[in-house]
Image: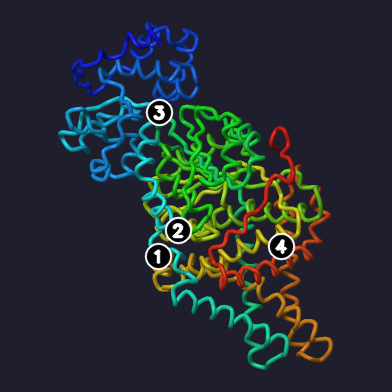
Amino acid sequence: MSAVAEFLPKPGASPAPWPATAPRRRLGRILREMDAISPDHLLSAVAMEARTRAPLAEILRAEGWVAEPALLAALSRLWGRPVADLAATPPDRAALQVLGTEFCLAERIVPIAGPDGAIRIATSRPDRFAEIAPRLPPDWRQMEIAGRDAPENAVLAEAADSLTRMAEARTPDALSCRGFGQSRPGRQTALALAAGLGLALLAGLFALGAGLAALLVWTTLVIALQSGLKLAALAAASRPRRPDPPGRAVPRLPIVSILVALHREPETAPSLIARLSRIDYPRALLDVLLVTEEDDRETRAALDAAGLPRWIRQVSVPPGSIRTKPRALNYALPLTRGEIVGVYDAEDSPAPEQVRDVVDSFRTAGPEVACVQCVLDYYRPRTNWLSRCFTAEYAVWFRVILPGLARLGLVVPLGGTSMFIRRAVLTGIGGWDAHNVTEDADLGLRLARSGYRTNVIASVTMEEPNCRPLPWIRQRSRWLKGYAMTWMVHMRHPERLWRDLGPWRFLGVQVLFLGTLSQFLLAPFLWAVWLAGPFGLADAAGLLPPILLYIVAAALDIAAMAWAVRGPGHRHLWPWLPTMIAYFPLATLAAWKGVAEILRKPFYWDKTEHGILAAPPTGF
């Protein structure tokens, strides 16, 4: 430390004015003079800087080639500014309110009061200070150097409560379901839905004349529309993909932030870090945040014990009025440093090249493409019958339905993981709806309403299959409950939704959301009517058209699945596809469980338990 201390500004010395720019090569020379870095590491860092255009200081931090005190001393000498002692000097609260919490977090700065009472700005990115200086009051432009995470930690210590409140109310009221089940309109909507479904089932069970005929027409229409949409998606997805137009030249790779929400998952910590470490992207441009609840001491302790690399941070979310994944993501969003924000689940094993593929997809797309969704697949699909069916269902959803919807220009209900979005767009539309238990599908719909598109790319993330019946039903009930709430929220004002989406996409939303719910919720009605036909309790001749249509729809489902699992890694599923007729009735149980929860506890997050099956060593 004596060699380092030699280069720090002397106590009491007048700080030199900071320059507008500083040659980054000088930082390396200063570190060599301090004997703080080896020649080999410096050469490697300079090569990375030329290749990635990442700041040299960030490269050195991410790779761990320079101790933080030495790097701070070198930056202090380079810029002629002192190192701020944020442990002894808390943020100036009044100045923090003037600048705004999110601005300070985004720019990695914190205002502090100097010995003379003047406001100074401590920053961990002195190379960016000239850019943000015009946005500061004229007498607040004295810069001090801070460690990489020091400004963020100082701001959080002062503003955690406001960030917590913001995390729960980021989405505008008109597009959020946070009042659902509590406000009178929300309760009335839920009760009307439940009453309508109950009457539908009564009509089916007792063959009530006109009501029975109306429900038969509705279910037949739903099956026809869903089959038509699936056929159109299959045709669109199976077309050869046209090569992307050449994108504009970019001077550098962007920083990519990745959020991983964990809750009561201490056993996944070591394997999670190993899987994230396989991502092939410059560490200086990779910003991974592991988001845990503040009271989840077991998971936080496991992450600490695992030893996080310097490019991975842990974020603890304070308690609030609800506890959901989107609330945790919203809390961490202001802490992200990337231009692109991605989401993974704790059990995910993404393809090593996935982040590069996502960046390339954004680079070659226009600004209207705000989101990129990757394909989700399952490892160990041969575990049992349920895992085989789940794998086939995921294959048709991510390899047929979502790519087809994207190519048809329809709304793409996003997956809750392996999706990447432009950070500016995400913050502009209000982040995730913290009260929606299918925040992913809701986000896809809000993106479309704001005029943005989603691309679906072939890069694969492997997940653990949910292969036990009761956990499967609980997970699916959460998804279907979220679909119902999303549909009801966006249909508060159908005319606005029509205006935002246009007729074609508006119809697609009805088929996707309302059609899916109707199909599962009214399945008992169909079963009851069809069973009543042979016994003379219903018009058997009148049942023939919907039965034939149902058979055609089932055949189309199997054909689409067969196409989706045609690859060498999935062909073993072909013999099992006819048995899917026994798989989907499970979703009916889940749908009715979800509807019951809308009435009792709409924001309850029925979490899926992970870690039952070990991931393959390679992740694939």
* Amino acid on which disc 3 is placed: Arg
Mark 1 crowd level (few <14, some 14–19, many ≥20, 10 Å Cα): some
Secondary structure at numbered mark 3: loop
**Image vertical order of residue 199 relative to residue 87, above or below:** below
Image quadrant where residue 447 sits = bottom left
Up the image or down, 377 lies above or below 169; here it is above
Q: Nearer the viewer, mark 3 or mark 2?
A: 3
The residue shown at (46%, 46%) is 421
**Amino acid tagged 1:** Asp
- Alpha carbons under labels 4 and 3: distance apart: 52 Å
Is residue 437 visible to us here? yes
Q: CA distance from mark 3 to mark 2?
A: 36 Å
**Residue furthest bottom in the image:** 209
Q: Label for residue 557? A: 4
- The reply, left or right, for residue 511 in relation to residue 569 is left
Kindly identify which residue carries mark 2: 448
Q: Tell me the tag on residue 148.
A: 3
Residue 10: quarter of image = top left
Look at the image and tell me in which quarter the N terminus lies. Answer: top left
Label whose residue precedes the other's in the sequence (4 or 2)? 2
Structure colour scheme: rainbow
**What's the amino acid at mark 2?**
Ala
- At label 4, counting other C-alpha atoms closer than 10 Å, the crowd grade (few under 14, some 14-19, many 20 or more) is many
Residue 525 in the image, given as x and y percentages of width and height = 70, 80
